């Protein structure tokens, strides 16, 4: 673990990480019970990336995310009940029930609704960053992407203009070793597909242990400070691992047992940070268990509420498709 923050911040980060973990677990079991419509692309195991990158952002800072958005949205402040309602297609969902699992978000807290196209959020994040620069404010954008997105044309086109124009955006590449079910070793010549390619665009980069929330947060702090100061973008390659498959129909038969044991059993970000905050005397075991129970209750109540929440009217399907401004 890296330098230790204040007890208040450490506990706050753990709360966010535990909330993400339990929210994703709840969705997983609801899906297995046949109650969850659609499929799921979950981020269990990648909680440190979301929380470390976003914990210190302001509401007016923006976050762009991918088809695996739940952890990012919760870390940015999207309401749990609104997230759960969205999963059930309710009009009280954070996107009015129209988005579903791969399109959650809430612009009121600076969370752009997720883009499920691989690499699709990159040029959008660059556009928001350009807007910030043109308005002469110091707001920043954190843009998440997977390792697979670094082979998309949108990645290279975006990095070209971001590096050239020194835009205030931080790219957080969650390298979880697989693009769907294909190993990064079969997809890239570079060991670090995001960081190793950064130099040709004039963008500084770092490779970070994505399962160490403090290491991620320290790297994010440096990158955010650069962006706010007008020094341009940073690419952070976060080495992490999704515990589950690419989606809910993926049994992960292609992953070696030893690899899974290391990342899931020995290097779990939530369990590791829990141990750290207890060792640092941030909180007692009894007090921490009470907080965990409180979080689990909030998520269970949100799920029960969402099951019977009102569905959108049929005519709402044609709303918000075309701009109706003047």
Image (cartoon, rainbow, N blue to C red):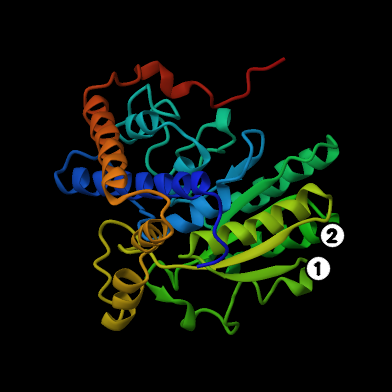
Q: How crowded is mark 1: few (under 14 residues within 10 Å), some or many (20 or more)?
A: some
Write the residue at 55% across / 80% down: 188
Q: Where is residue 87 in the image (x, y as percent from the top left)?
A: 33, 36
Write the residue at 48% across / 64% down: 212
Q: Position of residue 319 (x, y in %)?
A: 49, 21
Residue in the foreground of this view, choosing between 179 and 55: 55
Q: Name the residue under label 2.
A: 164
**Could you tell me which secondary element the residue under label 2 belongs to?**
helix
Question: Quick one: label 1 or label 2, which is nearer the N terminus?
Answer: 2
Residue located farthest toward the left when viewing the structure as drawn: 33
Q: Position of residue 21 (x, y in %)?
A: 33, 50
**Residue 120 shows in this picture:** no
Residue contact between numbered discs 1 and 2, judged by CB atoms under 8 Å: yes
Tell me if residue 80 comes above or below residue 325 in the rendering: below
Q: Where on the picture, by quarter, is residue 74?
A: top left
Q: Where on the picture, by quarter, is residue 107?
A: top right
Q: Name the residue under label 1.
A: 202
Residue 188's disc number: none
**Marks 1/2: CA–CA distance:** 7 Å
């Amino acid at each position: 673990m890296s330098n230790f923050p204040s007890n208040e911040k450490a506990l706050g980060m753990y709360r966010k990480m535990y909330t993400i973990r339990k929210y994703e677990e709840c969705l997983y079991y609801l899906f297995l019970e046949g109650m969850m419509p659609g499929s799921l692309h979950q981020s269990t195991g990648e909680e440190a990336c979301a929380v470390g990158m976003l914990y210190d952002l302001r509401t007016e800072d923006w976050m762009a995310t991918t088809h695996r958005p739940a952890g990012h949205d919760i870390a940015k402040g999207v309401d749990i009940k609104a997230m759960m309602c969205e999963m059930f297609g309710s009009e009280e969902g954070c996107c009015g029930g129209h988005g579903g699992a791969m399109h959650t978000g809430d612009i009121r807290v600076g969370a752009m609704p997720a883009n499920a196209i691989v690499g699709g959020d990159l040029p959008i994040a660059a556009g928001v960053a350009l807007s910030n620069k043109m308005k002469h404010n110091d707001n920043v954008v954190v843009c998440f992407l997977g390792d697979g997105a670094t082979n998309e044309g949108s990645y290279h086109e975006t990095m070209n203009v971001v590096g050239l124009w020194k835009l205030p955006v931080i790219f957080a590449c969650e390298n979880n070793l697989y693009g769907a079910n294909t190993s990064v070793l079969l997809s890239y010549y570079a060991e670090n597909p995001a960081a190793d390619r950064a130099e040709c665009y004039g963008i500084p980069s770092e490779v970070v242990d994505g399962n160490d929330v403090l290491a991620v947060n320290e790297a994010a702090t440096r990158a955010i400070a650069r962006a706010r100061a007008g020094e341009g973008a940073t690419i952070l390659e976060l080495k992490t691992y999704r515990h589950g498959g690419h989606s809910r129909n993926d049994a992960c038969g292609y992953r070696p047992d030893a690899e899974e044991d290391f990342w899931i059993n020995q290097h779990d970000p939530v369990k590791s940070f829990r141990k750290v905050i207890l060792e640092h005397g941030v909180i007692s075991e009894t007090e921490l268990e009470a907080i965990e129970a409180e979080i689990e209750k909030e998520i269970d109540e949100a799920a029960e509420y969402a099951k019977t929440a009102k569905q959108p009217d049929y005519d709402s399907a044609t709303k918000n498709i075309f701009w109706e401004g003047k």
